[in-house]
Image (tube, rainbow, N blue to C red):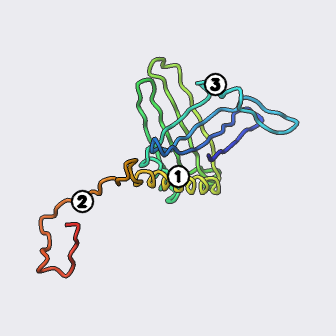
Amino acid sequence: MLQFYKPNPKVTGSACSFWASTSEKAVFGSFIKQDGWNTKSRTGSFNKNKDNPKAKAIVKFSVTEAASLIDAISRNETFSAYHDSKNQITKINFKPYMKEGKQAGFSYGVNKDSKEDSTNKSSFIIGLTFGEATALRIYLERNLGKIFDVMDAPHTDGSHPPAKKPAKKAEEPDSENSDILDEEW
């Protein structure tokens, strides 16, 4: 699990975590809002909001969405996604964060809106430094690799997933007139 904590004295901070599930072939991200601040130790707390649905969010990223997030970090671009479920709409946004006209890192935000109650809306945002974004990219790459390994693993009966043959091309070379013979054809 990869975690980022960004508490502040105003008690408006957030924490987010990322983890992968090879069984679900997905990467998950969660947010939780800060609930307190200890002035003496200069630390924030989040524990009171762990069971508060308005102060937490969980997002399931498909393999393609996780790869798109990696791409956004690598190319310094924006990634956004829209998830529509039975009970809510979730909007995800990851983009370069600008401060005083200069990029300071990335901004990652999630908005969730209830379909049953239009007043039930929650927003989460956290800033990631360049180093934190790089750690996220590496973490996602590593976990996508694990997911791909599971997808390619032998089945419980010892068989392997069927290999997909390429679509037959209109002009396939025949073996007599070709310098290269691909036995897969």
Q: Which mark is residue 101?
A: none
- The residue tagged 2 is 165
Mark 1 residue type: Asn
Q: Which mark is residue 51?
A: 3
- Residue at 56% across / 32% down in the picture? 57
**Mark 1, mark 3: which one is toward the viewer?**
1
Q: Looking at this view, is 6 or 29 the one in front?
A: 29
Give the Cα separation between the discs numbered 1 and 3.
27 Å
Q: Dot 3 lies on which element? A: loop
Side of 51 relative to 144 (left or right):
right
- Residue at 51% across / 30% down in the picture? 112
In the rendered image, the residue lying farthest to the right is: 40
- Looking at the image, tell me whether mark 1 or mark 2 is earlier in sequence order: 1
Give the Cα separation between the discs numbered 1 and 2.
27 Å
Say if 170 sits above or below 28 in the image.
below
- Residue at 76% across / 30% down in the picture? 36
Mark 3 residue type: Asp
Q: Looking at this view, is 115 or 64 the one in front?
A: 64
Side of 79 relative to 182 (left or right):
right
Side of 2 relative to 178 (left or right):
right
- The residue tagged 1 is 143
Q: Dot 2 lies on which element? A: loop
Do callouts 1 and 2 mark residues in contact (Cβ within 8 Å)? no
In the rendered image, the residue lying farthest to the top is: 117
Q: x, y percentage for residue 99?
A: 64, 50
Q: x, y percentage for residue 175?
A: 14, 76
Q: x, y percentage for residue 163?
A: 29, 57
**Mark 1, mark 2: which one is toward the viewer?**
2
Mark 2 residue type: Lys
Mark 3 burial class by Cα count in 10 Å: few <14, some 14-19, many 20+: few
Say if 43 sits above or below 36 in the image.
below
